[in-house]
Image: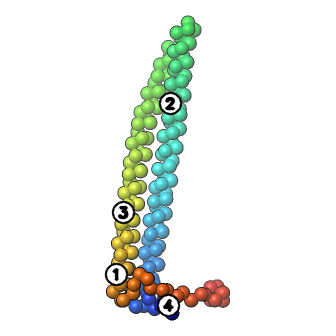
Amino acid sequence: MGTKFNDILEDADINLEEIISKTKEAAEVIGKKSAEKLEQSRKKVEYFDTKSKLNKQYEKYGRLCFDQMMGEEVSEDELSECAAKISELKDKLEILSVEVEAAKEKFNDAVNAAAQKAQKAYEGIKKEFEGNGETETAEVEIDPIDEGEAE
């Protein structure tokens, strides 16, 4: 017959409130990281939107230059305005590229740190179980909750 889950917790000197607290902390970290990932995604969308606008400006500038070469009347102001817009969008794209990369690195660093923290916590719990004679292959029996108890 297997060991009761409550017996394991009592034998390992593990406090259920501590487990719940650590689980809450992990959930909060995950929530914060999700918000950071959402912001990173927004930056990527803005980056691709800016890139699309830049391509349209290049296309417009190319059409104007072609029209001019074909002898059509093209305003120098329109060409200058288009060139200025291209320059502006290129600058914005460069800034967004740096921001996206920085957000990506920050997120990856935070995820790696959280993974290391979780690994250390797991190793600590494992040592507590091993210190009490429990092994990784121990069977655990969990008593089902009666429907009346669950409410």
Q: Secondary structure at mark 4?
A: loop
Q: Position of residue 7 (x, y in %)?
A: 45, 91
Mark 4 and mark 3 residues within 8 Å of each other at the beta carbon: no
Q: Nearer the viewer, mark 1 or mark 3?
A: 1
Report which residue position mark 2 lands on: 54
Q: Is residue 60 visible?
A: yes
Badge 2 local density, few (<14 within 10 Å), some, or many (20+)? many
- Mark 2 or 4: the one toward you: 4
Q: Which percent across, then down, holds residue 50?
A: 50, 36
Marks 2 and 4, how far apart at CA: 67 Å
Looking at the image, is mark 1 or mark 2 earlier in the sequence?
2
Kind of residue indicated by mark 3:
Ala
Which of 49 and 82 lies nearest the eye of the viewer?
49
Callout 4: few (<14), some (14-19), or many (20+) C-alpha neighbours within 10 Å?
A: few
The residue that disc 4 covers is: 2
On the image, the x and y values in percent for residue 151 come to 64, 85
Q: Amino acid at mark 2?
A: Leu
Circle 3 is placed at which residue position?
A: 113
How far separated are the C-alphas under marks 1 and 3?
A: 21 Å
Instruction: Report if the CB atoms under discs 1 and 3 are less than 8 Å apart.
Output: no
Report the amino acid beneath label 4.
Answer: Gly
In the image, which is nearer the foreground, mark 2 or mark 3?
Answer: 3
Which badge, 4 or 1, is on the more N-terminal residue?
Answer: 4
